[in-house]
Amino acid sequence: MHALDRTQTVTLAGAGLVGSLMAMFLARRGFQVEVLERRPDMRRETVEAGRSINLAISARGLYALKQVGLEDEARRHAIPMRGRMIHPLSGELTLQPYGKDDSQHINSISRAWLNQFLMTHAEGTGKVRIRFKQRIQSVDFDTGTLSVLDEPSGTTREERVPVLLGADGSGSAVRQAMAKLPGNTSTQDVLSHGYKELSIPAGPGGSFRMEKHALHIWPRGTFMLIALPNEDGSFTCTLFLPFEGPVSFASLDSPSKVTAFFQEQFPDAVPLIPTLTHDFFHNPTGHMVTVKSAPWHVEGRALVLGDAAHAIVPFFGQGMNCGFEDCVALDGLLARHSRWEDAFEEFFRLRKPNADAIADMAVENFIEMRDSTASPRFLLEKQVEKV
Ligand code: FAD
């Protein structure tokens, strides 16, 4: 039952970061891969890439790319960030290095570039077909049938799929279908903070208007601003703020209030963000969620991975990195096992404790980033470490 037959076609839900990379791993093992992606092809149409414009890729994520021969090219498009540059309300900027020397760093990379790069290389294997504007609506695991909405025509059809991998993100339709099965659990904790992206344009000649090789943080207790560098000299800022309360997205309801808030809290950032109020009122306010579910598979028929299995809040910059690590782990298990259910079962057993741990650490790191990075004790400890 459910033998791991390499002539089989595997269906993947989602051509996001994790789905596109997993498709490459599967193709390398000899499988034909059919990917169903609800968005249009972002290489041909302007599509909102979703969530953050850039993200931090760490050694874990780069290691996964290395396994499919893509690390070097990805590094050429990434900007090393050697530490956190803390912007206090008053006083000097402080760089808190991530490691003992510059070789220990994380890297800022464009989400859209990376996703397009992975899709192109997955298709380049000749074994991966990505079908866009195809939304999975529901899954019947007993019959191995998907209900798929073809967005352009508005028609729904059924597709038989022997093996389904759900990499369809934090709102995963595959996970939601699994959650209806007896004995399955799935929880979603939505953070009471939201986020908003703002832009610092490049300086003259594509120059960087702040330190290029740092992740900039303006920690302010219950809220914070961060900025990551982009290849073109710009920075993408993200404001993390409660949805409700005295200082919140709800309270900042006019351009004058937003300007006054920024002048009071982030005075050195204000001259760098010329489109502040435009960005604030035109860019969407994002939600952040922690998803915990169990188990991640239905026998040998279906498995969820990446955010679909374990979405985490972004404060450790590890969601995608963790999802990329899933791909490496699953690939290794597919090499060792002869039945899908055994590979899926071991994947869940190995990865679930790690996913739960990083989910909790990411919430804890929010408190450190927005608060403790600015505390005198933390700064002192960091100075001692440097010595
Ligand atoms: P997604 O990227 O969400 O991709 C899912 C794909 O599935 C999408 O293409 C979607 O269109 C498609 N899809 C969804 N539903 C369906 C359906 N029903 N049918 C067909 N297709 C469907 N992680 C890091 O490692 N470093 C960071 O610095 C970082 N920063 C972040 C900042 C923010 C503000 C946020 C919110 C997240 C951040 N993350 C970061 C987390 C990272 O974005 C996710 O972990 C990563 O995108 C997960 O990839 P994925 O492929 O599992 O899901």
Image (spheres, rainbow, N blue to C red):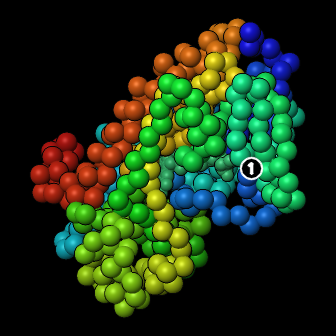
Q: Is mark 1 within 8 Å of ligand 1?
A: yes
Report the side of 98 relative to 60 (left or right).
left
Residue type at mark 1: give it: Arg
The single residue placed furthest to the bottom in the displayed view is 256
Q: Residue at x 46, y 26 (%)?
A: 352
Work out whether 23 lies above or below 86. Answer: above
What x and y, as percent, mark residue 275? 50, 83
What x and y, as percent, mark residue 50? 60, 59
Residue 383 appears in view:
no
- Tell me which corner region of the image, top left, top right, bottom left or bottom right, holds residue 325: top right
Which residue carries the number 1 mark?
A: 135
Q: Residue at x 61, y 12 (%)?
A: 342
Q: How many marks?
A: 1
Work out whether 205 lies above or below 189. Answer: below
Q: Residue at x 60, y 54 (%)?
A: 111
- Tell me which corner region of the image, top left, top right, bottom left or bottom right, holds residue 138: top right
What x and y, as percent, mark residue 57? 51, 45
Which quadrant does the C terminus fall into?
Answer: top left
Report the side of 183 relative to 297 (left or right).
left
The residue lying toward the viewer, choosing from 386 and 57, is: 57
Residue 350 appears in view:
yes
Q: Residue at x 25, y 82 (%)?
A: 264
